[in-house]
């Protein structure tokens, strides 16, 4: 009986230690979510300003050349998939990879896929998609900027060597109640369809906008910022979704540990009471044997 009590006592101690680790990871995930969501919010006004600047360029000079505006009909379809390399994220990579594979399968033509994260890269490769490149997953807000710069350089080099007609971005986007949903965005080309969508934005004041300086240089500078902010925002949303998934996983783990502790405590108390009852029974039996005729 004592061995069983000792075993249960060790299990309870291990469960308490694990619960402490889970609480720490929950706090880290919640803190990371706040940082990445704050980064996305901070880009909102700037992103809007860049879009309005492009609207001014388009309205002032409809023929102004825009970087990436040409569409190569014979080129492949490019895609960047933002995954995760960290554990305890549930089906984060599986859901995203399945969404990207289904979306790309519906598009005719060859594919060029860049993966952000080794785990999502392996899932895309298993699905038969050709992997053109691999990028590391950033582990902080400050690490997003170097990643975005690296992605832009690699994509531009690939576009010059083997042009792709269109470029899509696939990522998990934060949803309600600490959930995430797979999403996609067409980043390139910046063609007539993109211009029409952008032209729907209304100018915030009654004053007519005016572009100062060379239309082409201003447009290209705004395009660079537009591409950078688009990639940065999607990467930050992906990281926020990753930590949301981890937070949900830790909440489930915490509930399971609490249930396990309740069961272990109940069993421990029952065995201890049974041991006490047996000892009392032995004492009473011995007393009766000694006090008998």
Image: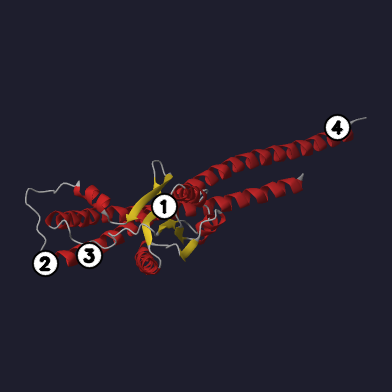
Q: Which residue is mark 4?
A: 288
Residue 268 falls left or right of residue 156: right
* N-term mark: 2 or 3: 2
Q: Nearer the viewer, residue 7 or 23?
A: 23
Badge 4, how many Cα within 10 Å: few under 14, some, many 20+? Answer: few
Q: Nearer the viewer, residue 167 or 83?
A: 167
Q: Which residue is mark 1?
A: 171
Q: Quadrant of residue 58?
A: bottom left
Please tell me whether mark 4 sits on a helix, a strand or a loop. helix
Q: Which residue is mark 2?
A: 213
Quadrant of the image containing the C terminus: top right
- Disc 2 to disc 3, C-alpha distance: 12 Å
Q: Which mark is residue 249?
A: none
* N-term mark: 2 or 1: 1
Q: Is residue 153 above or below residue 280?
A: below
Q: Which residue is mark 3?
A: 220
Task: Please report contact status of discs 2 and 4: CB closer than 8 Å, yes or no.
Answer: no
Q: Is residue 105 visible?
A: yes
* N-term mark: 2 or 4: 2
x, y (%) of residue 280? 77, 36
Badge 1, how many Cα within 10 Å: few under 14, some, many 20+? Answer: many
């Amino acid at each position: 009986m004592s061995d069983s009590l000792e075993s249960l006592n060790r299990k309870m101690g291990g469960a308490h230690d694990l619960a402490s680790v889970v609480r720490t990871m929950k706090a880290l995930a919640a803190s990371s979510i706040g940082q990445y969501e704050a980064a996305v919010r901070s880009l909102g006004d700037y992103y809007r300003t860049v879009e309005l600047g492009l609207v001014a360029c388009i309205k002032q000079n409809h023929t102004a050349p825009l970087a990436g505006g040409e569409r190569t009909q014979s080129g492949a379809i490019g895609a960047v998939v933002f995954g995760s390399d960290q554990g305890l994220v549930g089906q984060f990579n599986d859901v995203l990879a399945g969404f990207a594979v289904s979306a790309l399968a519906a598009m005719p033509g060859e594919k060029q896929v860049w993966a952000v994260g080794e785990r999502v890269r392996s899932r895309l490769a298993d699905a038969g998609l050709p992997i053109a490149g691999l990028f590391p997953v950033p582990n902080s807000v400050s690490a997003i900027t170097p990643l975005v710069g690296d992605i832009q350089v690699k994509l531009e080099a690939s576009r010059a060597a083997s042009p792709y007609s269109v470029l899509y971005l696939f990522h998990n986007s934060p949803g309600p109640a600490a959930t995430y949903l797979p999403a996609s965005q067409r980043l390139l080309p910046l063609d007539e369809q993109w211009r029409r969508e952008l032209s729907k934005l209304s100018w915030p004041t009654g004053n007519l906008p005016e572009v100062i300086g060379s239309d082409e240089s201003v447009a290209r500078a705004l395009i660079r910022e537009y591409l950078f902010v688009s990639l940065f925002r999607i990467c930050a949303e992906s990281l926020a979704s990753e930590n949301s998934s981890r937070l949900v996983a830790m909440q489930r783990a915490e509930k399971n540990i609490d249930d396990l502790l309740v069961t272990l405590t109940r069993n421990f108390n029952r065995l201890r009471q049974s041991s006490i009852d047996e000892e009392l029974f032995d004492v009473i039996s011995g007393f009766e044997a000694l006090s008998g005729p």
